[in-house]
Amino acid sequence: MATAIRLRRLGAAAAVATAASGAFLIQPSYSASDRGSGPASIAAVRQRISDRNAVVPPRAVQESALIAATAENPLDILVVGGGATGSGVAFDAVTRGLRVGLVEREDFSSGTSSRSTKLIHGGVRYLEKAVFNLDYGQLKLVFHALEERKQVIENAPHLCHALPCMTPCFDWFEVVYYWMGLKMYDLVAGLRLLHVSRYYSAQESVELFPTLARKGNNKSLKGTVVYYDGQMNDARLNVGLACSAAVAGAAVLNHAEVVSFLKDEASNRTIGARIRDNLSGKEFDTYAKVVVNAAGPFCDSVRKLADKDVKPMICPSSGVHIVLPDYYSPEGMGLIVPKTKDGRVVFMLPWLGRTIAGTTDSNTPITLLPEPHEDEIQFILDAICDYLNVKVRRTDVLSAWSGIRPLATDPSAKNTESISRDHVVCEDYPGLVTITGGKWTTYRGMAEDAVNAAIKSGKLTPQNGCLTSKLQIVGGDGWDPASFTVIAQQYTRMKKSHGKVVPGVMDTAAAKHLSHAYGTWAERVAAIAQNENLGKRLAHGYPILEAEVAYCARNEYCESAIDFIARRSRLAFLDTNAASRALPRVIEILASEHNWDDSRQTYELKKAKEFLETFKSSRNAQFHDGKHV
């Protein structure tokens, strides 16, 4: 009886979704605020960002631009926080013709934005909640996320792609239930559909995913339903957004912290901020008509600078992920289990040549460097163990990390107990607009909402409306999956070996890696590898080249060893021990680029090793072997 009711609800909700998606899809591609912006403005902005000879302004120039924003000549918008949302706000605002600055206490994507699930998804779980709770709010969340999902992939094609995800079914009810649910997911996506979902028999499923178990919980595999979501290199996408904003004219500065806010005595409005450069220790004032707080889990700390008694709006949640060798999952196919024995979702996805698995969802304190608990790592291992035919071992964990999701409550809402998975935009202090909550997939829409609120708050006059739905980030314009062949054919990897310089082949793995990481700007990196004898790999088994360290120091605001191993490359996330082995050479190249003395190099090595200790690989964690060995 319960089964019949669930299926009837699913069918009824599909009809509702069809009608809703129809209404959703007929909306014009240009918003009302875009009507004043002609094609010339879009073309001019696009040309500036897509120029392969464009130069990202040096950090010193960006800091000078912030210092030059005085009370008489302020910025239009100062963004606090350089994660996905903050960088998205800066990119949106500057491409509207506004004068924009951005400061980030650590590094672009140093927090939650580099510790995500790496999925660009519409939220299939929210769709299920919308159906069974008859919750239209959840359904709107799915509509918005699916609209943005394809947009993110189109805006950064070198860093994002569609990924098929397999859902195993161990009884026929699950086959029907998941097939109907995922067909409805396709339906809601409408014109933004990536690929159509479909059912595969047990035999076909095992051929597609060889490590999938044929039996689970004493039941035989009846088949799988495969659907598509997006996948990304999150930190590199975030860095790309910050660099795109910089190329477009924004003054972006990492390792720069807001110490206090500047206020107008007459109106008590926030009119700027006191900034500390955490690299030099120098402090300076930057004035702005509006400040946008996009500090993610730390947005309450920023709000307290304006009002120490402000009510908190963040409810932090911890998400732990682990990285396993590539043989756990086939290339190009993920595995998602919507409901494990304790009701949680678990997944296994191929990512950058390895397998990422997760995740957990538990309460956590807000810290700069959250660490995964051993029981959370063990939960993930236990959960995937039930669905695989290979021995799942704790000793196979190459890296494990924790990220903090900034789930938010709206301080202006009457019911402040309800925590939203949607984003919240508010101005609970004059001149300070806060944007928080949401998820990576919807960063562009979140940024658009935040800039709209800032324009209203500061009575700003942008030259045009939001353009970011029509703009690719740096490296994206003109890129296609075959771009790597140019690098493979036209460049060599000149390597220093035993005091001699020897030529090496720009092999397919290295060429593909550079093409996907840097897009159409990859040739700049390849040229450094060839012309400056920096073509050697940094770590055995990974295609990351020494040339990338020099390139990122010159063109991507890479100011520390941690910046490189964690965000410019993803080595710390892929393999903690490989990152540790690469550190001395990374520091040596950065020292040459930034003129570091011996004491700074020693400091960098110490800080990077402390950072890597928070990534619990099998070598730096204490655990009981149990059944996983």
Image (spheres, rainbow, N blue to C red):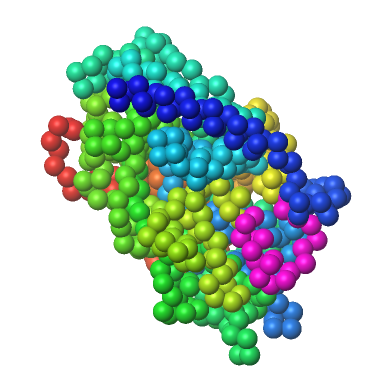
Q: In the image, 130: left or right of 505?
A: left
Q: Report x, y in % for residue 319.
A: 35, 48
Q: Which residue is at 69% across, 72% downward?
A: 458
Q: Quadrant of the C terminus?
A: top left
Is 456 part of what is drawn in magenta? yes
Q: Nearer the viewer, residue 520 or 238?
A: 238
Q: Report x, y in % for residue 628.
A: 18, 33
Q: How many marks?
A: 0
Q: In the image, 11: left or right of 321?
A: right
Q: Report x, y in % for residue 467.
A: 73, 50
Q: Report x, y in % for residue 360.
A: 31, 44
Q: Which residue is at 54% across, 53% downward?
A: 84
Question: To which quarter of the image does residue 288 belong?
Answer: bottom right
Q: Quadrant of the N terminus?
A: top left
**Above or below, comparing residue 235 to residue 595 in the picture:** above
Query: Would residue 258 be visible to someone looking at this image?
Result: yes
Question: To which quarter of the image does residue 284 belong?
Answer: bottom right
- Region in magenta: 448-467
Query: Would residue 242 be visible to someone looking at this image?
Result: no
Is 417 part of what is drawn in magenta? no
**Above or below, comparing residue 355 to residue 614 in the picture:** above
Q: Which residue is at 44% across, 58% downward?
A: 408
Q: Which residue is at 45% across, 15% downward?
A: 199
